[in-house]
Image: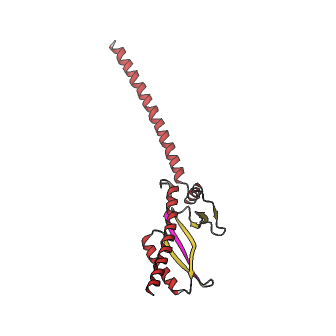
């Protein structure tokens, strides 16, 4: 009878061993499948990921005909450009020509330079100006360089937040320009 109990226990142990091997192999397959899926997600390029995210937040876009790394899109009525490549995880967001001042209005130009410098110290979005001598204007542009990859949680909200920063900069510059002008008029 002891021999019979020992044989039954041995068969139960072998059975549990077989079950354990089956479970381990299934877990390995699930892990391998997850790793393959994660690798596929990681391989989505910056360009496709950004364009997909633009679509999700309701923006239509178009590719520049000459520069295949540049796209144009509108967000909340403002026109933006984005430079991106699958070789980098950073994108350059541009809001071009959103304001201008007269080139030969020295007071206005001095205020603009001062306010742009202050804005660049306060905000992540950088403001620059270019001189258009033919049009006799100084044009104002904003730029932001942001990390954009699949590992960032809630990409749609992240992109909205980055784009909204451009509007904060616009408002800051417009308000500060008006304050400086008012101050100059009071002091005159």
Nearer the observer, 65 or 118: 118
Observer able to see residue 185? yes
Q: How is the image coloured?
A: secondary structure
Residue 183 x/y as whole percent: 44, 81
Tell whether position 166 is magenta.
no
| 71 w.r.t. 49: above or below | below
Residue 67 x/y as whole percent: 63, 69
Residue 49 x/y as whole percent: 56, 57
Query: From the image, which quarter does the C terminus lie in?
Result: bottom left
Nearer the observer, 136 or 3: 136
The total of numbered circles placed on residues is 0
Residue 142 x/y as whole percent: 52, 71
Please tell me which residue is depicted at 49% across the width and 40% down the height of the picture.
Answer: 30
| 29 w.r.t. 83: above or below | above
Please tell me which residue is depicted at 51% across the width and 43% down the height of the picture.
Answer: 33
Query: From the image, which quarter does the N terminus lie in?
Result: top left
Q: Is residue 6 left or right of residue 127?
A: left
Q: Residue furthest left?
A: 2
What secondary structure is the magenta-colored segment mainly? Answer: strand
| 80 w.r.t. 111: above or below | above
Nearer the observer, 26 or 13: 26
Residue 78 lies in what quarter of the image? bottom right
Please tell me which residue is depicted at 47% across the width and 36% down the height of the picture.
Answer: 25
| 144 w.r.t. 45: above or below | below
Q: Which residues are magenta?
A: 136-146
Nearer the observer, 175 or 18: 175
Observer able to see residue 148? no
Q: Residue furthest top?
A: 1
Please tell me which residue is depicted at 47% across the width and 39% down the height of the picture.
Answer: 28
Q: Residue furthest front?
A: 186
């Amino acid at each position: 009878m002891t021999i019979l109990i020992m044989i039954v226990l041995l068969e139960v142990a072998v059975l549990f061993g077989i079950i354990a091997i089956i479970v381990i192999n299934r877990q390995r397959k699930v892990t391998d499948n997850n790793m393959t899926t994660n690798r596929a997600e990681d391989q989505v390029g910056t360009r496709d990921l950004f364009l997909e995210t633009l679509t999700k937040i309701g923006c239509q876009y178009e590719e520049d005909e000459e520069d295949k790394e540049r796209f144009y899109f509108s967000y909340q009525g403002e026109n933006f450009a984005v430079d991106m490549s699958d070789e980098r995880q950073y994108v350059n967001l541009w809001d071009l020509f959103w304001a201008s001042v007269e080139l030969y209005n020295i007071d206005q130009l001095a205020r603009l330079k001062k306010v742009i410098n202050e804005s660049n110290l306060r905000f992540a979005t950088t403001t620059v100006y270019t001189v258009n001598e033919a049009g006799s204007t100084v044009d104002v542009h904003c730029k932001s360089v942001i990390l954009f990859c699949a590992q960032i949680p809630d990409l749609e909200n992240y992109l909205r937040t980055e784009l909204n920063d451009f509007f904060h900069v616009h408002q800051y510059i417009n308000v500060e320009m008006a304050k400086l002008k008012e101050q100059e008029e009071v002091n005159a």
